[in-house]
Image (cartoon, rainbow, N blue to C red):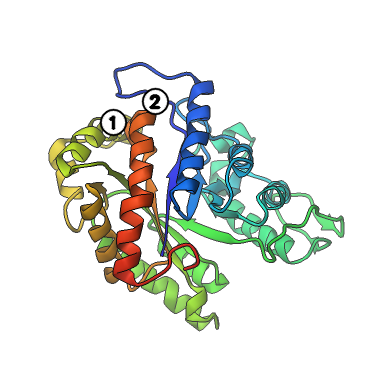
Amino acid sequence: MQIGIDSFAALNADSPTAGKASAEQRLADLLEEIELADQVGLDVFGIGEHHRQEFLDSAPTIILAAAAARTKRIRLTSAVTVLSAADPVRVFQEFATLDLISHGRAEMIVGRGSFVEAFPLFGLELEDYASLFTEKLDLLLKIRQDPKLRWSGQHRPALTGQGIYPRPLQDPLPVWLGVGGTPESFVRAGTLGLPLMVAIIGGETHRFLPLIELYRKAGARAGHAPENLRVGLHCLGYVTDTTPQATDEFYPGYAKAFTDIGRERGWPPTTRAQFNAVSGPTGALNVGNPEAVAEKIVRVNQVMGGISRYSFQLSVAALSHSKLMHAIELLGTRVAPLVRRELGVAGAKS
């Protein structure tokens, strides 16, 4: 199993009330965090894509390229690329370039995104939400196969054999499908034979098992080998020296972030009781000391029938750079070895 980290490059200081770090310093800190993740043996680092004031990840491939120059072995991915609002030709060119810079360590996770700011920003209609993604995913996968394809669609000018370069070092360039809770998305990933990255940010993890089974069944019907139908989980979490310390440090920023989002979407404020429930043995949050966090990963792996990647989202809770660095160190030196030993796998090559 690969163990990694996803970041939204949140522009936060140590707590929701401590003021904001400068954008320049936050990006410098983020590159240090990726560099440390590489040094301590984590397998993958992902950068999200948002077009909001509180995040600095509107151009994730630039951050990943800077990280590629400072790392040696960790895989570098988007988490996710909002493909509905992007040009697949440009997306492919950017990640192919990243792949060359990183000597074959680039990946992308493509999805529709959980926020909608990108649509009006790039002159797109929300009513085309579904058709934009379907068409652009089709084009991206065809570009991956053929540098000079002929293609036409509804949302982009036709391609008539123009060359799409550069080509990546990896053939094919890894493309995962990032999904939330829509059954059709799971079936789509299975039918296409794409690895699946499931965002589980609340509720109980085992509730996603029927959807993952849908993915595996769709993949089998389409003739894809079981070993190619890989499943990854993107989960909120945090690790530090003790479980009480972890929950006390993670909760305030987590509660503010989800209360703020809830204000936009009509949810009630987040409470400590809700946090405690979702942090429990079957809940989606993985917050605790290294042993507790590793135990939960192993348990989730068993419940889900085997997963290929578990990625922590640490940056949602307004944690300081020093706390994030300590968490990354513990994930690499304590959590990952415990999980790999328990599962009997080598880690990076799994």
Mark 1 is on which residue type?
A: Gly
Q: Which residue is mark 1?
A: 253
Report how many numbered discs are placed on residues in the image. Answer: 2
Q: Viewed as shown, does residue 14 lie left or right of 117?
A: left
Task: Examine the rendered structure and indicate whether residue 338 appears above or below residue 93.
Answer: below
Mark 2 is on which residue type?
A: Asn
Snapshot quadrant of residue 339: bottom left
Front in this rendered view, residue 222 or 236: 236
How far apart marks 2 and 1 lie (CA) works out to 9 Å
Where residue 158 appears, x then y in whole percent? Answer: 80, 54
User: Which residue is pictured at 23% across the width and 33% down the height?
Assistant: 249
Q: Residues within 10 Å of mark 2 (few under 14, many from 20)?
A: many
Where residue 160 appears, x then y in whole percent? Answer: 86, 58
Q: Residues within 10 Å of mark 1 (few under 14, many from 20)?
A: many
Snapshot quadrant of residue 335: bottom left
Front in this rendered view, residue 256 or 250: 250
Q: Which residue is mark 2?
A: 12
Where residue 29 appears, x then y in whole percent? Answer: 48, 30
User: Which residue is pictured at 73% across the width and 49% down the height?
Assistant: 93
Tell me if label 2 and label 1 are in contact, CB under 8 Å. Answer: yes
Q: Is residue 247 visible?
A: yes
Q: Viewed as shown, does residue 1 lie left or right of 120?
A: left
Where residue 108 appears, x then y in whole percent? Answer: 58, 53
Q: Return the disc, 2 or 1, that comes first in the chain's sequence.
A: 2
User: Which residue is pictured at 65% across the width and 55% down the height?
Assistant: 136
Task: Examine the rendered structure and indicate whether residue 279 appears above or below residue 301.
Answer: above
Q: Is residue 79 visible?
A: no
Task: Examine the rendered structure and indicate whether residue 106 appears above or below residue 120.
Answer: below
